[in-house]
Image (tube, rainbow, N blue to C red):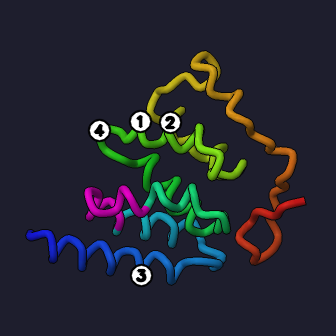
Amino acid sequence: MGADGELERTGELLRWLETLRGRDLTDAEVEAAADRLLGASALALPILLAQFADADEDAALLAVATVTLKRWAEPHPIEPLMALLRSPGVGALGKALIMKVLERYGVDTDASGLFGVGLDLEAYTLDTGGGDGGVSRN
């Protein structure tokens, strides 16, 4: 596929992913979205990584990105995730989810000094009873 075709397909993936923004996705919907993204993994990776740096921290998009990256085939995108983890533009929820992905890849986040990257998880509470995406800022 040429560069124009890849750019068009990337745009289609991004537009489709944006339709999930703000939705209260079921586990099955998150898994189905992950399947679709894994089918186009080379094109999807930059889109997935961008979800963690999104200032809006959309819970649905973060869930899709996290599940997709947890299922990612080797080689795992450890370096870009580590860079995001150290980025001041990534919020606490995004950093916590990145750490979960890295743990899935076998990275020892306790021993590697990653926990000191400025997480403030006390700023978040989980809400399991509503349609607000499950995460709220205190």
Q: In which quarter of the image is the N terminus?
A: bottom left
Q: Earlier in the sequence, mark 1 or mark 4?
A: 4
Q: Residue furthest top?
A: 111
Do labels 3 and 4 touch, CB within 8 Å? no
Q: Where is residue 25 in the image (x, y as percent from the top left)?
A: 60, 74
Image quarter for residue 16? Answer: bottom left
Name which residue type carries label 3. Answer: Arg
> What number is the disc on residue 79?
1
Residue to which mark 3 is pinned: 15
> What number is the disc on residue 82?
2
Please provide the residue range marked out in magenta.
37-47
Look at the numbered disc 1 and give the secondary structure of its residue.
helix
Q: In which quarter of the image is the C terminus?
A: bottom right
Q: Which residue is drawn at 38% across and 58% down?
A: 46
Do labels 2 and 1 touch, CB within 8 Å? yes
Q: Is residue 29 magenta?
A: no
Q: Where is residue 33 in the image (x, y as percent from the top left)?
A: 43, 69
Which SS does the magenta portion mostly show?
Answer: helix
